[in-house]
Image (tube, helix red, strand yellow):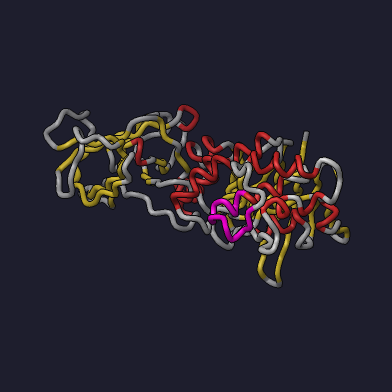
Amino acid sequence: MTAVEIVQVGKSYGDVVALDSVDLTLDTGEFVAVLGPSGCGKTTLLRCIAGFERIDHGRITLGGRVVTLPGVHMPPHRRHVTVVPQDGALFPHLSVADNVGYGLGRGRGKTARVEECLELVGLGGLGARMPHELSGGQQQRVAVARALAPHPPLVLLDEPFSALDASLRTGLREDVRRALAEDGATALLVTHDQGEALSMAHRVAVMRDGRIHQFDTPAEVYRHPVDSWVAQFVGEAMLLPLEGPAGHAERMSRLGVVRLRPDLVDLAGGPTALVRPEQVRIVRAGTLAPGHAVPGRVAQIAYHGHDALITVDVPGSQTAMVRVIDDPVTAVEPGDDVRLWVEGDCTAYPAEAVAAESGATPLPVVG
């Protein structure tokens, strides 16, 4: 069943187009993330769904009810949609339990529902505390519990983890996702954090300049970006121009042989391949490597504990990126001479399409 249907929605502020004919559909119980840079229109979209903004054209339907058309605007309180803001926005003079139960009225079962929601977010037994007695992460959990309490058809999350320390975000994301799933809630998360979107959502809508460029599963968005801009926005990416005739899966690049996906082998005119850092293999110079491996020198290593992102200078080219799992046996150091090669099938784009996308910085091929 469709919980949210957004059809050709447009919204402008004077000459600034915030939403440009946006289409988006959420199924009941689905968790969707809208991912994009600041100013792309994602928060405006959330505000239009909630009823805080009027649209210029298009249609928004919630649970089969049309709530917004040009000239028709159902007010926010009648939409039964709840919003979890960035800062939680708890009432400081109310206890945790009273905050959670604020929108429940005085009906029978209120206390039980409040306790149920606090248990869902991992705060069972803390209902008597005041907001100032909680940590920032706990306050955000209370905000989620308050949003879930009235069984809304839709929960809107407006970058709710952005103000938290990195150490708190990962665990809280998982707990919030679990709580939403256990309560059967439909949710839409607005975020500029790609890790947040990819790890939490069933589907991700990647947004730019008021338009949704791609709407698919996290794996598809990462592995098969629809264009070079999405490829570079979602994860680290290298764009490598290729040489070789159409109809051949293996083409030559500055990082040696690149193999195209089977459905892309007929691309002609020097297409550009997307290579993720984890597709690049690296060994010290003098170590056994394929014949098509290319030489390079380690310039920098960004160590993350579980893995490392290695920047390598490739002669006659821009730098290349290599992601490796932390392994002291195969570790390299800045200044080491190495050899590189690409493994796995790669997505590719027509050269003219890449040229049209701003911010594309492909590695040049051999002249």
Residue lying furthest bottom in this view?
14
Relative image position of residue 251 (x, y in whole percent) = 34, 34
Residues 282 and 262: in front is: 282
133 part of magenta stretch: yes
Residue lying furthest left in this view?
286
281 part of magenta stretch: no
Relative image position of residue 150 (x, y in whole percent) = 78, 46
Look at the picture and state if 297 lies above or below 57: above
Examine the rendering and report whether any part of residue 23 can be seen. Answer: no
Residues 116 and 81: in front is: 116
Q: Is residue 6 left or right of residue 174?
A: right
Q: Which residues are magenta?
A: 129-141
Quadrant of the rendered image containing residue 246: top left
User: On the rendered image, what quadrant is the N terminus found in?
Assistant: top right
Determine the main secondary structure of the stretch shown in magenta.
Answer: helix
Q: Is residue 289 left or right of residue 265?
A: left
Relative image position of residue 54 (x, y in whole percent) = 79, 62
The residue that appears at 80% across and 44% down in the rendered structure is: 110
The residue that appears at 39% across and 29% down in the rendered structure is: 248
The residue that appears at 73% across and 44% down in the rendered structure is: 114
